Image (cartoon, helix red, strand yellow):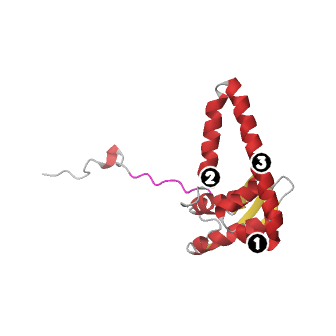
Amino acid sequence: MGSPPDARLAGERVEALLAQLRADPRAADVAEDLVRCLIDLYGAGLARIAELVGPDTLRELADDPLVESLLLVHDLHPLDPDARVQRALDRVRPYLGSHAGGVRYLGIDADGVVRLELEGTCHGCPSSTVTVQHAIEQAVRDAVPEASGIHVAGVAAPAPLLQIGRPPQQFLECPVEVR
């Protein structure tokens, strides 16, 4: 058996195929019904497997990214959203530590927005924008796809770029007459 498929890539492929089928209204209805039926069938099978293996084994299985993505799709993940956010942040903390900063989880608000705060030298640092967008937000988005958004306190606006160019014309001429 080869390596397991990447769940994100597989999901993107399914969405692309559905988008193609939506161009033909007759095919779109049939395709969407087929996909819904397959998801329901596999979801029921996965729910039965989860029941048979028990909560401890299910938590172990959820450590695998592919299995975790399937458990999330079918609302079978053994960890609640708070625990999944904490686990996702634990995965990116070593990366943040290399930037002499950290992140604190503040919770999920009533609107489903995950609230985080940068700590250490990451707080207020313009380069934190890149750190947050690429590491923290992606990890949290993958762990809690049902969240309606992610808000990170302590992210500074990017610093303006220093423009280096030719000096104004007045400085190009030599103020002293050269003979």
* Image coords of residue 116 (percent x, y): 73, 64
Instruction: Report helix, strand or loop for mark 3.
Output: helix
Observer-nearest of 96 and 50:
50
Q: Quadrant of residue 66?
A: bottom right
* Image coords of residue 143 (percent x, y): 71, 61
Quarter of the figure that contains the N terminus: bottom right
Can you tell which of label 2 and label 1 is closer to the viewer?
Answer: 1
Asked whether the beta carbons under mark 3 and mark 2 sit within 8 Å of each other, the answer is no
Q: Is residue 157 visible?
A: yes
Q: Is residue 112 above or below residue 37?
A: below
Residue 158, numbered label: none
Can you tell which of label 3 and label 1 is closer to the viewer?
Answer: 3
Packing grade of label 1 (10 A; few <14, some 14-19, many >=20) is few
List the residue tagged with mark 3: 41
Which span is picked out in magenta? 157-164
List the residue tagged with mark 1: 57
| Residue 105 is covered by the magenta coloring | no
Instruction: Say what amino acid the circle numbered 3 marks.
Output: Leu
Instruction: Report helix, strand or loop for mark 2.
Output: helix
Q: Is residue 114 above or below residue 98?
A: above
